[in-house]
Image (cartoon, rainbow, N blue to C red):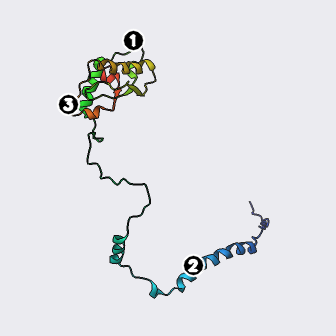
Amino acid sequence: AKLPDSAPAPVARPKPQPAQAESAKAPERKDAEKPVKEASSKPKSDEKQFNADEISALLDKQKPSGGGAKRSTQQSSLGGEKDQGQKLSKSEQGALESQLGGCWTLPVGLEGSENFVVVVRFNLDTNGKLDGRPSVEQSSGNRQFDESAVRAVQKCDVAGLQVPAGKQDIWNDIRVTFDPREMLGL
């Protein structure tokens, strides 16, 4: 196996046109050089030294700007009748779910109802009585199941739900998850 003595000549590639490349680069260089010349033309003696005392004095004298949202001129609230941060404790939530579980009857003949879960939202007044109609906040996907949970809240309302004294304000907006495995032990 003898190697060939000659090889085909490579194909010549077209040469880039240098005139276009230089003309495109030339304006950029001129623009880039101008700020450098301006900066170097300033005498360095005019530059001020950093002085923290002067800056803090200026900041202290400066009035707040008027930008942004309009702020209230009234004093901030130090707490009111409703404490927005307060929530039901786990034991209070458990007691409520236990009461509602006693009033809840699953729809008859509904297959797989132990796998359904619905979240019902309702309001109670200060006496533990229902204020308005309960609503389905997160559906189980089965209308009969969802309505059975709403009926449970309404059924328990006849006797009134037992709410701890002094905490009626947090019972205003309640969300309960109706899960038959948890509430009915299925």
What's the residue at 26%, 23% (across, down)? 161
Q: Is residue 6 left or right of residue 172?
A: right
| Residue sitting at the far top | 109
Q: Secondary structure at mark 3?
A: loop
The crowd level at tag 1 (other Cα within 10 Å; few <14, some 14-19, many 20+) is few
Q: Looking at the image, which is closer to me, 20 or 74?
A: 74
Q: Secondary structure at mark 1?
A: loop
The crowd level at tag 2 (other Cα within 10 Å; few <14, some 14-19, many 20+) is few
Distance (Cα) linking label 3 and label 1:
37 Å
Q: Position of residue 58 (x, y in %)?
A: 36, 74
Q: Is residue 65 above or below residue 156?
A: below
Residue behind mark 3: 165
Q: Earlier in the sequence, mark 3 or mark 1?
A: 1
Query: At label 3, which amino acid type do we have?
Result: Ala
Distance (Cα) linking label 2 and label 3:
74 Å
What's the residue at 67%, 75% (across, down)? 27
Query: At label 2, which amino acid type do we have?
Result: Pro
Q: Looking at the image, which is closer to me, 154 or 29?
A: 154
What's the residue at 39%, 14% (across, down)? 107
Residue behind mark 2: 35
- Rendering quarter of residue 106: top left
Residue behind mark 1: 108
